[in-house]
Amino acid sequence: MPEQRAQLLAAAFRRAPIGMALLGTDGAFLDVNDALCDLLDVPRADLLGRAVRDVTHPDDRSDDDTQVQRTLDGAQDGFERRRRYLRRDGSVVQAQVRVSLLAGTSGEPGALLLQLQDVTAVQDLTERLHLAVDATQDGIWDWRPPLGTLDCTDRCVLLGGVPLGGRTLRAWWRALPPGERPRLLRAYRRHAQGKADVIDLEFRQRGADGVDRWLALRGRVTARDGSVVTRVTGTLSDVTERVQAQRDMQVLLDNLPAMIGYWDAGLRNRFGNRAYLDWFGKTPRQMRGRHIRDVIGADAYRLNRPFMDAVLRGEAQVFDRTITDAAGAERHTELRYVPDVQGGEVRGFFALGTDVTARRVAEQALREQRELARVTLASIGDSVITTDPHGHVTFLNPVAQRMTGWSNEDAAGQPIETVMPLLDETTLRAAPNPLRAALRRREIMAMAGGTALRARGGALHSVEDSAAPILSESGKLLGAVIVFHDVTQTRAMALRMSHLAQHDTLTDLPNRVLLRDRIVQATTLARRRGAAFAVLFLDLDHFKDVNDTLGHHAGDQLLREVARRLTGTLRASDTVSRQGGDEFIILLPEVSSAAHVQTVIGKLMAAVTAPYDLDGQAAHVTLSLGAALYPQDGADPDELLKHADAAMYRAKADGRNRHHFYSRALHGEIQRQQQLRHDLRAALDAGQFWLAYQPKVNPASGELLGAEALLRWNGPDGPVSPATFIPVAEETGLIVPLGRWVLREACAQARRWADAGQPLAVSVNISAAQFADPTFVDTVQDELRASALSAHLLELEVTETLLMRHVEHVQRNLGVLRAQGVQVSIDDFGTGYSSLSYLHEFPVTTLKIDRSFLAPGRSGPQATALITAIIGLGRALNLQVIAEGVEQPAQVRALLDLGCAAMQGYLFAPPLPPAAFEAWRRDWPAQHAALTAQA
């Protein structure tokens, strides 16, 4: 028995899927299994007796020696590390290695068991992820407490101030400011104990580059073994700008005499400036987080609660109160509650308090001075300059001092033009100061647009605002005040917004608005000079395939590269515009001839159709291009664009990857297409559509299996072929409401037949546009409910191409409908590109053999083999198979012989109106008998 056990252990050792070896205490291979030999690509005989150091990467040998010696000395039972090993060809393999000590018979170290798991692919992926993470502005860290390992990105090392090579927990701990260590421990313990959702800490630290920064450390436990934390991951972010901005704002607010506080939706304090805190005699620590009732007292809380309720509903409140301040004095206060609305939700409110005691108790003799102070205080935040009645400066607030470069002492008594010289931004000539006009006319005067201020140091600031006279209660002119602010950045932003309004955001090419303006200019210039110009309409062929196969990111990259190639091929005076999607329009001003345009088109086609490298993925697109020339093809922008567009669509219709010049022959076709679109839009409301029904039968048994609803249109000039109007409906988007109408009518007809005691399943064709409509499933369910039709009497026919376009979306939506009993059929099966590996995953009930397999010229062994394969596939997947397009008795016999019992086609009946269908249904038994006799 022991011998048998030993044999089993030896067999397990040799056949283990991971590399395994027995090492002597000297580190030499005593035995190895096949997986290890395969991993290192070294024969077993060549490994036995060699030291494991010989196949270990030189950089890993020293630590290996240390860990092995610690294991042999009994300091540890073994160890587990990530190691690199050398294959016979010199390549490096990454492995997760585990070494365990095997004791001898007397308890002494007998051997070492080595287990290697190939993690090269994992390591490669990890390194790629590190590259992606390092490209961000945040550092990422991953700590595993039981192993004592800390993994982090280069950004983390830079921000954390850890020396190169210091990616260890010890190095991080040493780099952390001593005062922050207890805070970090407390934050970690609170999170680990479930008292906080995340580890959240901000602190100041000098980075490895010597720069002092404010850092935000965020993390959370991501793995536990029972109650033991086994993994913690998080980020380290540079928040210096935010912290500095907060401090700057705090300094600004603390220097405002107004009392400003902020209370959240739970009525707890989150902020108060110095004036606000002094009013209540509180420090920030004493105030923050406290409920407003505990701060102002129960009586005041009860009195003010209606205003609080109103502001939390989003309604600003203004009211007066007499409040006892921290010193016990009663003060008259004007309070404003302003809601803080974010994303449509009131997050809290600002409490703004102004002490108006002095204003109410001051003597009338101080009114003039108080009015001056009130206007000045009301203007805080902008630059404010006051003058006497002669326009000589009396005061500048701090903002105005910084902006003009003048101090109060230097500016006092100076003319306003000296302290505040204004210029016209366009001409840089002196501009009048509105303060002079305000003094003269005793009314508010606005600053002229496009005005700039030349500061004392020479800097130029774009400014705007107004000046007003300061009048006493009796109407006496006391002086004037001018309030202004720096709008340099605002005007720069306006220019930027103007650019964005006229350019495509993806490619930065001129958009439709700017293009039209340039075509108007080109038309004016060409008319004046008797010259010609061309408008080219470009559309990328099958661009959607790039989006579907490589993703939208690759599609965007392709569009940017196309834009670059187009602009690089043309003259600086030409305009390339993106209209959205994969459409571009080019304006070629001052062309000499159609041959000139032909040459340019050739260059454009060659540039665009050259191969693309999209982040390592090869892509190819072709181009359909239409051209219209001024003046022969149009006299205004709309006409030229319309004709270039028509020429482009002709190029697509001719097979794509080509160009077409507009011609008069296209004009009639354009008019017919426009008339068809117009008639189609009106047809649904006019009741011109109707449904025909073609039966599906079992010619062997005579059973009527169902009917397919087919859309027909009696247009103003007679019947219009579906082959003509369906593509137009899809192009214009009318296919969605039209498809909804078909679904409604088909359900209603099926219900009428069911009510008449002749229930029959009706199938409806579903377009890709309908299926892409987010409300599609709801629409089907609504129509079933509205008609009270049993779901099993409705069948949806979808194409293979639609199924494979968005597999998960199709599976989900069809799955919902199928679960309710709706039947699902794949129409035209065998003509698309569905993957058989996906087919069994779709909730499909029926396969329809496309009529092309039964068409004349397709008979023979090959067609028979294809039909047989489809029938066999349907049988294997437990699906019904129906052949459409059956027109001859011989086809019936052949299909029955192949095992296909369900058929549809003109041999049995053409598509019929409901009344004719019911008549056919009555005659079907006799027709079936005749068909059976022919067979």
Image (cartoon, rainbow, N blue to C red):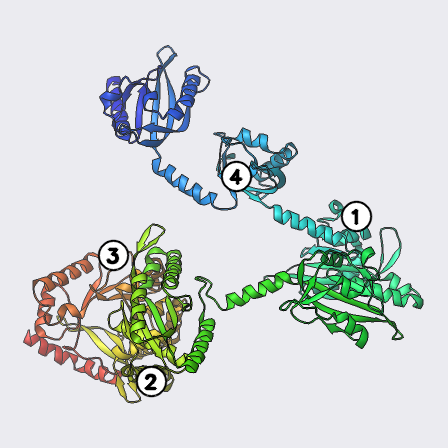
Instruction: Give the mark nearest the N terminus, 3 or 4.
Output: 4
Q: CA distance from mark 3 to mark 4?
A: 46 Å
Residue 299 x %, y %:
81, 57
- Regarding mark 2 in the picture, which secondary structure is present there? helix
* Mark seen at residue 675: 2
Q: Please rate how many residues cluster around mark 3, counting C-alpha atoms within 10 Å: few if below 14, some from 14 to 19, many from 20.
A: few
Q: CA distance from mark 2 to mark 3?
A: 41 Å
- Which residue is under mark 1? 282
Instruction: Give the mark nearest the N terminus, 1 or 3.
Output: 1
Instruction: Give the mark nearest the N terminus, 4 or 2.
Output: 4
Instruction: Give the mark nearest the N terminus, 2 or 1.
Output: 1
The residue lying furthest to the top in this view is 106
- 2 vs 3, front mark: 2
- 1 vs 4, front mark: 4
The residue lying furthest to the left in this view is 934
Q: CA distance from mark 2 to mark 1?
A: 78 Å
Residue kind at label 4, given as amino acid type: Cys
Residue 385 x %, y %:
78, 63
In which quarter of the view is residue 319 placed? bottom right
In percent of the image, x 15 and y 78: which residue is there? Answer: 925
Instruction: Give the mark nearest the N terminus, 1 or 4.
Output: 4
Relative side of 24 to 927, left or right: right
* Mark seen at residue 156: 4
Residue kind at label 1, given as amino acid type: Lys
Q: Nearer the viewer, residue 678 or 21?
A: 678
- Which residue is under mark 3? 835
- Regarding mark 4 in the picture, which secondary structure is present there? helix
Tell whether label 4 touches label 3 (CB within 8 Å).
Answer: no
